[in-house]
Image (tube, rainbow, N blue to C red):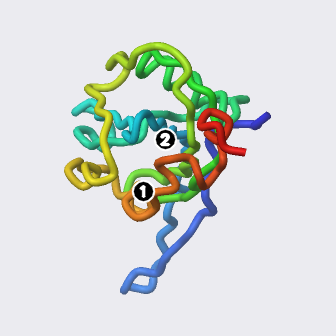
Amino acid sequence: MRDACCVFATIASRTTHHGTRTIIPPMKVIDVAAGLVFHEGKLLITLRYPEAHLGGLWEFPGGKLESDETFEACLARELQEELGIEISVGDLVESLTHAYPERTVHLRFYRCRWARGEPQPLGCADFRWVSANELADYAFPAADARLLARLRQDAALWNGEETGENRENKGSP
């Protein structure tokens, strides 16, 4: 289990043009789990509340880890809270760290299987099921850029071939 959900980056400093050193406070790193929930050739995305950090942008459902919580447990909890659905967490698809001016996020994106419940916007402003071609029609946070490019280019991510997760469901050997 994890000791804490957040860690701090190393303290940095810089020298101003006057020769004085300014200490840059450590930036909090926030661990976030996000789910790639595919269904019938579509991917589930959610809309952030307007007043939230990065408000009004679309994202992959998930959220911040709580203390002593794994990424997988966080993801199951967050999708239940945000959308009222139960999922089973599969393989890790992407892991990245992105620095915003006010915080740094460490994101882990997992392939998820939708198990039960109809999605409802319980902890998000809205949700959509979108195709690979439709992803470009939605504005996402900068941290998702690398994954979005991969999703647009790699059809295997959409049909489970990359991880083999859906083989038993499709009758493949």
Vertical comparison of 41 with 151: above or below: above
In the picture, the quarter occupied by the C terminus is: top right
Vertical comparison of 62 with 108: above or below: above
Foreground residue among 27 and 143: 143
Residue 116's spot in the image, x, y percent?
52, 15
Query: At x 36% / y 42%, what residue is drawn?
Result: 59
Residue 3's spot in the image, x, y percent?
76, 37
Residue 89, located in which quarter of the rendered image?
top right
Query: Label 2 belongs to which residue?
Result: 36
Q: Amino acid at mark 2?
A: Leu
Foreground residue among 35 and 100: 35
Query: At x 49% / y 54%, what residue is drawn?
Result: 104
Residue 54's spot in the image, x, y percent?
30, 44
Residue 151's disc is: 1
**Which mark sits nearer the N-terminus, 2 or 1?**
2
Vertical comparison of 71 with 8: above or below: above
